[in-house]
Amino acid sequence: MNDGPRASGENADDPGMAPASSLPGVGPSLRQALEKLGIVRVQDLWFHLPLRYEDRTRLTAIGDLRIGEAAQVEGVVEAIETGFRYRATLRVAITDDSQHTLVLRFFHFHRAQVARLVPGARLRCYGEVRHGQHGPEMVHPQYLVLQGEAAVEECLTPVYPTTEGLGQKRLRGVIDKALARLPPDARLELIPPTLRAPLDLSSLREALLVVHRPPPQADLAALARGAHPAQRRLAFEELLAQHLGLKRLRAQVRSHRAQALHGDVRLRERFLAALPFTLTRAQRRVDAEIARDLALDKPMLRLVQGDVGSGKTVVAALAALAAVAGGRQAALMAPTELLAEQHLRNFRAWFAPLGIDVAWLAGKVQGRARKAALGAVAGGASIVVGTHALMQEGVEFARLGLAIVDEQHRFGVQQRMALRDKTRAADVMPHQLVLTATPIPRTLAMSVYADLDVSALDELPPGRTPVQTVAVSNARRGEVIERIRAACAEGRQVYWVCTIIEESEQLIAQAAEVTFSELSNALPELKIALLHGRMKPSEKQATMDAFKAGGIAVLVATTVIEVGVDVPDASLMVIENAERLGLAQMHQLRGRVGRGSVASGCVLLYQPPLSSLARQRLEAMRETNDGFVIAERDLQLRGPGELLGTRQTGELGFRIADLARDADLLPAVQRIGAAMLQSHPELATRLVARWIGASARFADA
Ligand code: ADP
Ligand code: MG
């Protein structure tokens, strides 16, 4: 971390390089919160772009509210009730001129807050409308107690990615201050004018101002679709920065030597003989491709693409075995603790009989246990499994020979760079293997994975039964609950997945809690459990273990279960608000069922009315179980986002670019990228630092 007083001196004439803490009002606590977001310098604030926009330019009558949509309403408090049924709840009923009632529901509240919510008080609130027990309700809406008249907003309200303890308002305030320091275009631009001219892009300064603070006269429809010239301008630059970063990484990595790993035939045979299955043809092919790379003294940079359930883990284990046989360490990193723990169990089961120890290191491993784990890693533990905590400062490997990163789309380019940063100083580089379940078409792969060679695991192990998928309107929720009752009566196990599109883990957890109490009420005879990202890892694990052991019939979960969870007996999945999920995500979720030999089902529960895009997505899910077909359909369908400013960029870690929407920019990105690396390497460096630099340094946030 070098954001001290020296930082501004590195490039004194660049206001973007000044530390964020040089802005008025940024004290130590705000500085820390910003750092968690990867924001260290003023320019990091310029390039911290909104996830979406909220429309608070109008008020909606309570009678006109639509379930599942966010809206702003104004009403008078009719009644307040605090209760402690499953947990502390505050419910506030408000009414407006349309004579309809809306319930606001809170799970966390202070006494001072309750004191202000007296009958007769006038509230303006903004939130997402859900089905409540007695009509529409909002869970944890943002609200304001009005004193007299208050004007509505004049322009769209940007919503930024943020972190706990840093509210949108405060973040907007500090971004305002940073924007005030934007220099004129001539100093802000990093793409040389000769390269830029033929592209007809708008000015960078203008683009930033529009995207952060859309003025009232801006083309709001275009902004909502992500097609505004300002967004295209920034998307181009982001794609270029990423491309440059990856190209440079590849060149850097490949310029180093790696330890050639030839594996040990006898050890491999013992490993394979102990498996309860034989490898598929695809697994054998990919395994051979990896073995060939590992046997060279240049670092491997290989991506294994394979649909959910295609058996990537065992391929990774074989690579790890080669590292161990060569006297080197292998590290396996997963994006979530749950997934990492599952890998740990698999690896231990596979490696223990061979006398190979597997060490465990996750972010939550603290204190003495952490010290011991770090000691083992530094002392040469053969295999280390963990979350991205493995990449954190302070983790030293004695002789890392192979780094395996699972479910790459969750890590993103930034983290990949951090991993390589970490090992760059060493004279011998580890080989790198990346596993991803996101099948993406070739042209895009060339761009997103510009630094990697690609292997495809294009065959599922035998014996899988395709999942029967149906789409059901939420109006028939009761029937779905009956179907669960029937399935569980036959001894089957069920996932109920809660999704809401929100950047806050807290809100998602709350939505899951509401559903959990609903199902607990409706199905009192069944053992139902709750799983979400805000639970302690030990609680999560205990719940997963109980589910796996069959002690839980219905698991109400958020998308923490999206990647990698493997419970072969779970054979029914309900996905709530399916209409709002992208195809790729639905496919990932559905991959959790259909793992055993019993026929499995997936119910996509949607909130009518369906847009035509959502209808087509649900149709695609019903028609096929094939990840590659789904990926292609996804690309065709995506195009303009239908929701206000919602972008499906998250999975690839982009702030503004969308590979489907902005695919037409890629040829120019590759052309200009090559030219910049050739003739303006220093500008390329600054461009990468601007978009990726800070978050790469804080990848563990
Ligand atoms: P993913 O590619 O989604 O990571 P996993 O590696 O978790 O898939 O494998 C999914 C399941 O398939 C696991 O239970 C694993 O043991 C099993 N499996 C892997 N390879 C085979 C195979 N060749 N034959 C049968 N089952 C296999
Ligand atoms: Mg996996």
Image (tube, grey):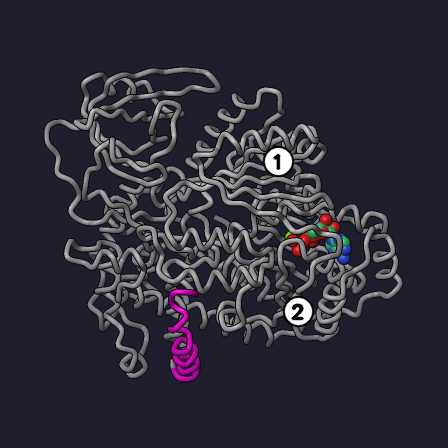
* Residue type of the residue flagged with mark 2: Val
Residue 464 shown left or right of residue 253 in the figure: right
Q: Which residue is mark 1?
A: 494
User: How many numbered callouts?
Assistant: 2
Disc 2 residue crowd, few under 14, some 14–19, many 20+, Cα 10 Å? some
Residue 150 placement: quadrant:
top left
Is 27 rendered above or below residue 216? above
Secondary structure type for disc 2: strand
Question: Distance of mark 2 from mark 1, alpha carbons?
Answer: 48 Å
Report if residue 672 lies within the magenta region.
Answer: yes
Residue 232 shown left or right of residue 340 in the figure: left
Residue 404 shown left or right of residue 272 in the figure: left
Residue that appears at 28% across and 82% down:
198
* Among numbered discs 2 and 1, the one appearing first in the sequence: 2
Q: Position of residue 649 (x, y in %)?
A: 42, 57
Span shown in magenta: 660-679
Q: Which residue is mark 2?
A: 428
Q: Position of residue 473 (x, y in %)?
A: 45, 39
Secondary structure mainly formed by the magenta segment? helix
